[in-house]
Image: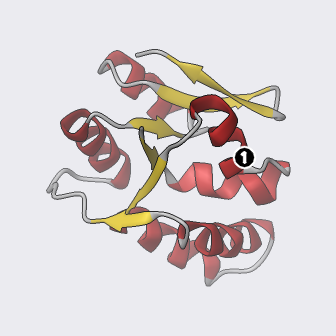
């Protein structure tokens, strides 16, 4: 199972204390974590700042090392649109806690993993 990690997903461990990889392992068993180069770029930009978001982004950058980083192959505007396009094209499930992105993915028929009660992850079928 290929699982595409959004920027927001990679911030969850530091923001909510969720062990992202263990939760995904519990949901899917074996899975292949994937991150778009654009997501890594967003994390890098956030990590250069200060405060909680910057610290969470640095944790996210450390976590992304356990993933396969790939180019989106898209010219769509915005990282979210590239995530949607890649997930549709490659048949990936997307992990995100971004409400707008989650709803857009579900409308496109893409399965989404999102936080439930800020404690665990749940699979939503698109």
Q: Nearer the viewer, residue 30 or 6?
A: 30
Find residue 71 and report its horizontal and vertical position in percent. 25, 65
Q: Quick check: 41 above or below 126?
A: below
What residue is shown with label 1? 22
Q: Residue at x 73, y 66 (%)?
A: 56
Q: Quick check: 105 above or below 55?
A: above
Q: Nearer the viewer, residue 105 or 18?
A: 18
Q: Residue at x 38, y 27 (%)?
A: 105
Find residue 82 and report its horizontal and vertical position in percent. 28, 49
- Colour scheme of this structure image? secondary structure
Q: Residue at x 14, y 56 (%)?
A: 75
Find residue 16 and report its horizontal and vertical position in percent. 82, 48
Q: Quick check: 96 above or below 60?
A: above
Q: Residue at x 40, y 64 (%)?
A: 68
- Residue 2 found in image quarter: top left
Query: Would residue 13 appear left or right of 7 to someone viewing this image?
Result: right
Furthest residue in direction bottom, as rendered: 48
Q: Secondary structure at mark 1?
A: helix
């Amino acid at each position: 199972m290929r699982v595409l990690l959004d920027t927001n997903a990679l911030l969850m461990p530091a923001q909510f204390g969720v062990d992202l990889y263990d939760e995904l392992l519990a949901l899917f068993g074996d899975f292949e974590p994937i991150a778009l180069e654009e997501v890594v770029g967003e994390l890098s930009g956030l990590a250069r700042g200060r405060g909680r978001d910057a610290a969470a982004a640095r944790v996210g950058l450390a976590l992304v090392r356990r993933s396969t980083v790939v180019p989106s192959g898209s010219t769509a505007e915005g990282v979210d649109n590239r995530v949607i396009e890649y997930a549709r094209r490659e048949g990936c499930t997307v992990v995100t806690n971004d409400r707008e992105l989650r709803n857009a993915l579900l409308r496109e028929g893409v399965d989404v993993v999102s936080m439930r009660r800020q404690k665990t992850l749940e699979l939503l079928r698109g």
